[in-house]
């Protein structure tokens, strides 16, 4: 069973188009074509086009941070899968906890996006994870199960290996509080079991499950050594070339 590690940088609402190009140049100058790690950067919408140009001929892939499930229409402020594809975007983060919390996104709405992304040859990075209150109430696995099953409703066996799951405990995002390797591995193994029940073991073994939440070069080696942790979704540490490169190297 071989799953290539994946390191994805979520820039959130940071970087102008010019800042993004500068960061990409610094990253690609040092990383070149690392053979054993898949790398994705996810700039804000306004930096996607220039990022795509800066990534021409590079092995680093381009991701978006969100999309709308409809093809087109009266959805002010939104962008569709087709629009992202036209900018050479290959991945899209869906269901990030910031979208769930600040924009009231539900599992049903996130599921529509997952289905639409796959129908348009985009690879969704579906984020799931519990809040601190849910963890303290012993609800972690139930929350993760509901979000995973809800997000994947209607995703077929043919499509599932194009999906990446990101386990991001909400209490660890941007807080500096990283989950222990044991806490992370427990949930990753639980998600893998769930995927096995839904899609069978051969497919479940191929699906990448990333950890996200204050991952840094210092804590990455331990997390990435766990059997079911297949990479990272990185927020803060993806905004600086040095820390992002070191994270990619930790996964190599
Ligand atoms: C994220 O927002 O996906 C994330 C993991 O952020 P950070 O690495 O800053 O905790």
Image (tube, grey):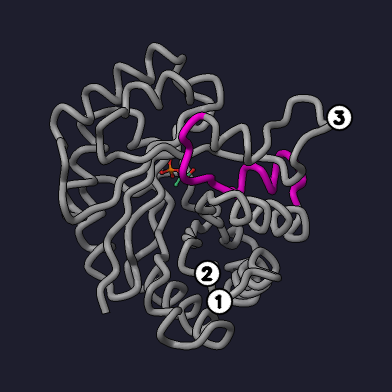
Is the CB–ligand 1 distance for label 1 below 8 Å? Answer: no
**Residue closer to the observer: 83 or 92:** 83
Badges 1 and 2: C-beta atoms under 8 Å apart? yes
Most extreme residue toward the right is 74
Residue 74: mark in rendering: 3
Looking at the image, residue 32 lies above or below residue 164: above
Q: Residue at 38% of width from left, 37% of height from top?
A: 41
Q: Measure the alpha-carbon separation of dots 1 and 3.
A: 33 Å
**Sequence-earlier tag: 3 or 2:** 3
Q: Quadrant of ligand 1?
A: top left
Is the CB–ligand 1 distance for label 3 below 8 Å? Answer: no
- Residue range of the region highlighted in magenta in the rendering: 87-105
Residue at which label 2 appears: 160
Q: Measure the alpha-carbon separation of dots 1 and 2.
A: 5 Å
Looking at the rendered structure, the secondary structure element under dot 3 is loop
Looking at the image, residue 234 lies above or below residue 4: above
Residue 157: mark in rendering: 1
Q: Residue 146 at what x, y percent from top left?
A: 68, 72
Q: Residue 167 at what x, y percent from top left?
A: 48, 61
Q: Residue at 74% of width from left, 25% of height from top?
A: 77
Looking at the image, residue 74 lies above or below residue 178: above
Q: Residues within 10 Å of mark 1 (few under 14, many from 20)?
A: few
């Amino acid at each position: 069973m071989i799953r290539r590690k994946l390191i994805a940088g979520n820039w959130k609402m940071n970087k102008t188009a010019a800042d993004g190009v500068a960061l990409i140049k610094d990253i690609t100058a040092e990383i070149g074509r690392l053979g054993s790690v898949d790398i994705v950067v996810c700039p804000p919408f306004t930096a996607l086009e220039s990022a795509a140009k800066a990534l021409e001929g590079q092995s680093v892939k381009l991701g978006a941070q969100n999309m709308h499930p409809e093809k087109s229409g009266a959805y002010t402020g939104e962008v569709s899968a087709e629009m992202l594809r036209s900018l050479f975007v290959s991945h899209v983060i869906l269901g990030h906890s910031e979208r769930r919390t600040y924009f009231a996104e539900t599992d049903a709405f996130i599921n529509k996006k997952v289905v639409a992304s796959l129908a348009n040859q985009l690879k969704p990075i579906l984020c799931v994870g519990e809040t601190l209150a849910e963890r303290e109430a012993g609800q972690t696995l139930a929350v993760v199960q509901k979000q995973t099953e809800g997000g994947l409703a209607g995703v077929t066996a043919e499509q599932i290996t194009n999906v990446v799951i990101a386990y991001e405990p909400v209490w660890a995002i941007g807080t500096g509080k990283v989950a222990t390797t044991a806490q992370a591995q427990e949930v990753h193994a639980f998600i893998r079991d769930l995927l096995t029940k839904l899609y069978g073991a051969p497919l479940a073994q191929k699906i990448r499950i990333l950890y996200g939440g204050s991952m840094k070069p210092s804590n990455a080696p331990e997390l990435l050594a766990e059997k079911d942790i297949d990479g990272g979704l990185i927020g803060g540490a993806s905004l600086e070339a040095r820390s992002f490169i070191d994270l990619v190297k930790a996964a190599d």
